[in-house]
Image (cartoon, rainbow, N blue to C red):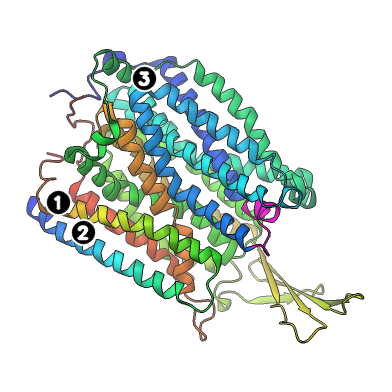
């Protein structure tokens, strides 16, 4: 089980990176549109500073998992 | 090592003493949820009074009020009040959050509209809404911690289950007060000033709740570490700068609370929004359906909380997530089918009533004409569908003509109404599975000295951000499937967001969460 936990750490890091890329990609596409409504601007300007650190948190979780920090949790 | 949560069992209350603790904590938390939800439910009325549609700055503020208070400020409230709660105690901290919430809510009910004080009105509303978010961020962790620290270890899930009912019952209470006021005053008076009544009524409930809380004593576990001089000097640093604690905060967030948050918001708010905006079911009817499902579902918070004391918290929460992942799409497809806006081949239209017709009026001063076409259809299954299409034609052809407004409303037949309520009830059961045990789970994951801080942050990130974003991201996902060939898009596409978040959380939780948290050793 501990090996699976460690290997999954790479998955969580990859997932976090993919999510950050997706968020920026969508935000740039939406905000570069010809007409941008105020609520859409607020949405992206609120979401990015909140979600990107959260995804970094997921990456950190993945790093801890990869390093075996959670091996003893639950034993 | 000693178990910090169980080592104080000699101090815990029993019988009426414990019930009074639970009652005093729950009532205050319930009122805070009520205060928070009435703003959301009455948002269209508030927008009309304070955020006029023609004013771009006001529109920015309206959106900020929604996003900032719901998502961003709550975690800051968790940090600010969590730190206070670990430094000065649970009792005084969640007394402050209650007062802050009560005063903000009461003030929202008194602020004059945009037509009276101009831009000051939306500025004040925004500030008060932010204070509401801060207060809510500090309240829940305090109440859950306070009840858990009074409860015996072997019944902690059951007793914190009472705190877990408050968010849902607060929503129910807000719906009940709003519907009662609206029905009593009528639509016009409610739109003009009646919407203020639920805000002002809150002050009475807050006063009673503050009175009850003033009579409470400090948590026995907190008192004990205070007297032994082992309080944390810097709970924020200890919670998030020490790897041992930070890794548990991350585990709580990504292995439990994020998934719990999306299941919670999908089962209640997205279900409500879906019935309103996609199924087009009549406003009051949607609220009655949700209320019926909540009333029948609420006892299950206690049932699953109690069950988690016996078989552990983890697999009940994971089970709720798994059921949501597997069944959301069929449930929402059925909800679409039950409404007339679903697959049109699903039912046979039987009659087009005589009330359909077009009325045209011409403005004598401007020459603009407005035609209103009403169509009413009844279906074999008893549903009734009404569409009112308003087309305004400007006399001045050089101006851009406004787009037609179409308002569709569906009244469900009795059997479809009950079936819809059943489908929402199933989702409420998932909510109770993930949410019932989670307070005890979070409390047990962290030591007493930093518990308020450490559990509040993941809770409000999971619920405020991952969960709170469900309606917005779901709307975004549906809109992204709209094409010229398919103008409505995939109306179930919005479910991908909660399903993906719950699935990630399910995998992390299943792999990493301990099966029994009540045996975790902590050093206080």
| Cβ atoms under marks 3 and 1 closer than 8 Å | no
Q: Nearer the viewer, residue B163 or B226?
A: B226
Task: Tell which subunit mark 3 falls on.
Answer: B
Which residue is located at x 54 percent, y 51 percent? B65
Estimate the x, y position of residue B292 in percent, counting from the top left.
57, 46
Q: Is residue A21 visible?
A: yes
The residue beneath circle 2 is: A12
Residue bearing the label numbered 1:
A65
**Quarter location, residue B313:** top left
Q: Position of residue A56 (x, y in %)?
A: 26, 56
Give the Cα separation between the discs numbered 3 and 1.
35 Å
Q: Which residues are magenta?
A: B43-55
Q: Quadrant of residue B524?
A: top left
| 10 Å crowding of disc 1: few (<14), some (14-19), many (20+) | many
Nearest to the observer: residue B69 or residue A73: B69
Q: Is residue B401 magenta?
A: no
Determine which residue is flagged by label 3: B219
Spatial CA span between label 2 and label 3: 38 Å
Pointer 2 and pointer 1: residues touching (CB < 8 Å)? yes
Q: Is residue B104 found left or right of B220 in the rendered image?
A: right
Q: SS for tag 3?
A: loop
**Sequence order check, earlier mark of 2 and 1:** 2
Q: Secondary structure at mark 1?
A: helix
Percent x, y for residue B458? 33, 43
Q: Quadrant of residue B279?
A: bottom right
């Amino acid at each position: 089980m501990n090996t699976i936990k460690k290997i999954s750490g790479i998955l969580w890091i990859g997932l976090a990176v993919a999510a950050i890329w997706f968020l920026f990609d969508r935000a740039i596409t939406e905000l570069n549109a010809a007409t941008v409504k105020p609520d859409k601007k607020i949405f992206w300007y609120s979401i990015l500073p909140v979600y990107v650190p959260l995804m970094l948190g997921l990456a950190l979780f993945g790093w801890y998992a990869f390093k075996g920090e959670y091996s003893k949790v639950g034993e | 090592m000693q178990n910090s949560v169980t080592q104080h069992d000699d101090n815990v209350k029993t019988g009426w003493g414990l019930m009074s603790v639970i009652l005093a904590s729950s009532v205050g938390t319930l009122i805070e949820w009520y205060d928070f939800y009435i703003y959301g439910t009455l948002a269209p009325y508030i927008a009309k009074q304070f955020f006029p549609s023609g004013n771009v700055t006001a529109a920015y503020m309206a959106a900020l009020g929604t996003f900032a208070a719901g998502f961003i400020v709550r975690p800051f409230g968790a940090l600010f009040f969590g730190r206070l709660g670990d430094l000065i105690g649970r009792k005084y901290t969640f007394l402050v959050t209650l007062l802050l919430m009560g005063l903000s809510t009461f003030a929202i009910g008194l602020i004059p509209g945009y037509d009276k004080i101009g831009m000051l009105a939306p500025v004040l509303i925004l500030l008060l809404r932010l204070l509401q978010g801060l207060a809510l961020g500090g309240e829940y962790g305090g109440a859950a911690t306070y009840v858990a620290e009074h409860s015996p270890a072997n019944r902690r899930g059951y007793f914190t289950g009472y705190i877990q009912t408050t968010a849902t019952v607060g929503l129910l209470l807000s719906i009940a007060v709003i519907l009662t006021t609206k029905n009593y005053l009528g639509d016009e008076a409610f739109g003009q000033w009646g919407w203020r009544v639920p805000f002002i009524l809150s002050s009475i409930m807050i006063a009673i709740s503050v009175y009850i809380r003033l009579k409470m004593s400090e948590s026995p576990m907190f008192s004990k570490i205070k007297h032994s001089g082992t309080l944390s000097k810097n709970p924020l640093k200890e919670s998030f700068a020490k790897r041992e604690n930070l890794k548990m905060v991350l585990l709580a967030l990504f292995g439990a609370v994020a998934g719990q948050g999306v299941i919670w918001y999908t089962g209640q708010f997205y279900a409500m929004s879906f019935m309103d905006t996609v199924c087009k079911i009549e406003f009051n009817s949607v609220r009655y359906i949700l209320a019926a499902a909540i009333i029948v579902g609420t006892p299950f918070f206690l049932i699953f909380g109690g069950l988690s004391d016996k078989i552990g918290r983890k697999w009940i929460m994971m089970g709720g997530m798994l059921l949501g992942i597997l069944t959301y799409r069929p449930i929402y497809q059925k909800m679409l089918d039950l409404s007339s806006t679903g697959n049109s081949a699903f039912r046979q239209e039987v009659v087009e009533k005589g009330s359909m017709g077009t009325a045209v009026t011409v403005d004598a001063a401007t020459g603009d004409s407005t035609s209103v076409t009403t169509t009413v259809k009844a279906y074999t299954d008893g549903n009734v569908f009404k569409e009112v299409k308003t087309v305004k034609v400007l006399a001045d052809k050089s101006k851009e003509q406004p787009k037609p407004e179409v308002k569709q409303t569906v009244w469900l037949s009795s059997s479809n109404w009950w079936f819809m309520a059943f489908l929402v009830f199933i989702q409420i059961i998932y909510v109770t599975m993930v949410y019932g045990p989670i307070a005890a789970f979070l409390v047990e994951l962290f030591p007493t000295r930093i518990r308020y801080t450490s559990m509040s942050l993941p809770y409000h990130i999971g619920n405020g951000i991952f969960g709170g974003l469900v309606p917005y991201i779901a709307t975004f996902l549906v809109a992204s499937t709209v094409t010229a060939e398919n103008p409505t898009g995939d109306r179930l596409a919005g479910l991908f967001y909660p399903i993906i978040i719950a699935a990630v959380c399910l995998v992390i939780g299943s792999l990493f969460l301990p099966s029994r948290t009540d045996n975790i050793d902590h050093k206080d």
